[in-house]
Amino acid sequence: MPFDLVLRGGRVIDPSQKLDAVTDVAFAGGKVAMIGKELKVDAGTDVRDVSGYIVTPGLIDLHTHVYWGGTSLGIDAEEFCRTSGVTTAVDTGSAGPGNFVGFRKHVIEPSQVRILAYLHVSHAGIYGFSHRVMVGESEEMRLMNPIDAVAVAEANRDLIVGIKVRVGLHASGTSGIAPLDIALEVAGQVGMPLMAHIDHPPPSYEEVVARLRPGDVLTHAFRPFPNTATTAQGTVKKVVLDARERGVLFDIGHGKGSFAFRTARAMLANGFYPDTISSDVHALCIDGPAFDQVTTMSKFLCMGMPLPDVIAASTVNAAMALRRPELGSLKPGSVGDASLISIAQGQHDYVDAVGEHLIGDRKIVSEGVVIGGRWWHPKPSSKFKQIVG
């Protein structure tokens, strides 16, 4: 089969194959076709010289809010993905069983980028999240809709990857942990993982983590005090270690208020890396402090997490959390998505959700993306012009 596209001479970092080498990547029929040096091409192949840049599997942002126009916190998925190197945006609970059909028809299906979703157990998802109105959808128990959530998840298994619930003082208020128990019941019924949001207590970090099952995801896992994963002595709480031992996954979900350098430093110092790095990008944090996926990744790079591990947390690890092994890899036969990044040296100012600043010496920059085996660059540029042979 002739190649549709070849990325020529980039540094290919693919943690799913433990690959870190300067080589070519070829795509055909919407999939990865071959990896190798100086691949032979024909006259119809789009060949891009990417020497000097890093080629990774298509970045997966496991926590986004992209129900643009349907919820007040939604951002435009295509614009976000173009600028942040993301090829798969996973919406986490923007829509519930009462409005998922609109999300699917008006946003997901027309999108050029892949959008997958965790379905909220609350009827209308996260409907009251803006600068002026902040209503915790999990506080109103009358909005819990487990029966319809099961039906909608079953009918949309091609797009729905799990069940979402938000608990904490701001999200579930006086209902406490009860919405989590309902969501767990739904997830068990449909055989899908759960993603749980946690904010201020009650409930406590310990109560939430103790309920999660193997394959479930705790997002906002490196959040600041209160409800943080670490002790006052800087160690990782035992309930967190026990949860990882049984297979619970820990996701960053930076967002507006859910990531602290202090927590992250303690977790990394204890050898506890996040399973997945995600931005939790939405309308209230896209202009800071989260900004985008590559900025969130950059923070971990600057705190000492090795680049291959940072990439793994945004590719193969996320794909495994989604139970979509065809994503997050450049193995031949995988979905033909790739991200091009560079590492900019210099002084870069990063800020967390509580206002602490970190001056880092590196920044991951999105340079372009391949989606479905086709070049899909963020803007007209002289970079990566088509070459012959």
Image: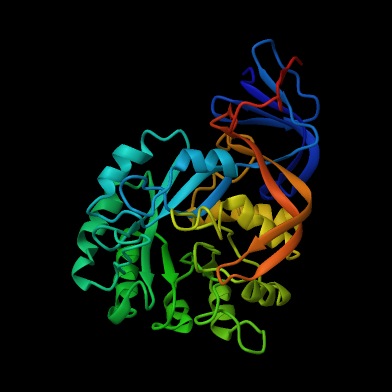
Give the tally of numbered discs. Answer: 0
Extreme-top residue of the structure: 43
Q: Nearer the viewer, residue 10 or 152?
A: 10
Residue 365 visible? The answer is yes
Q: Quadrant of residue 362?
A: bottom right
Residue 315 visible? The answer is no
- Residue 89 in percent (x, y) is at 48, 47
Q: With 55 as the anchor, is 219 left or right in this view?
A: left
Above or below residue 356? Residue 90 is above
- Residue 93 in percent (x, y) is at 36, 57
Above or below residue 381? Residue 254 is below
Which residue corresponds to the image point at 45% horizontal and 42% vertical from the top-left? 77
- Residue 306 in percent (x, y) is at 75, 59
Quarter of the image with the C terminus in it: top right
Extreme-left residue of the structure: 142
Which residue corresponds to the image point at 63% horizontal and 54% vertical from the top-left? 295
Q: Nearer the viewer, residue 37 or 202?
A: 202
Q: Quadrant of residue 228?
A: bottom right
Extreme-front residue of the structure: 132
Which residue corresponds to the image point at 23% horizontal and 72% vertical from the top-left? 140
Quarter of the image with the N terminus in it: top right
- Residue 332 in percent (x, y) is at 63, 35
Which residue corresponds to the image point at 49% horizontal and 39% vertical from the top-left? 79
Q: With 305 as the anchor, is 109 left or right in this view?
A: left
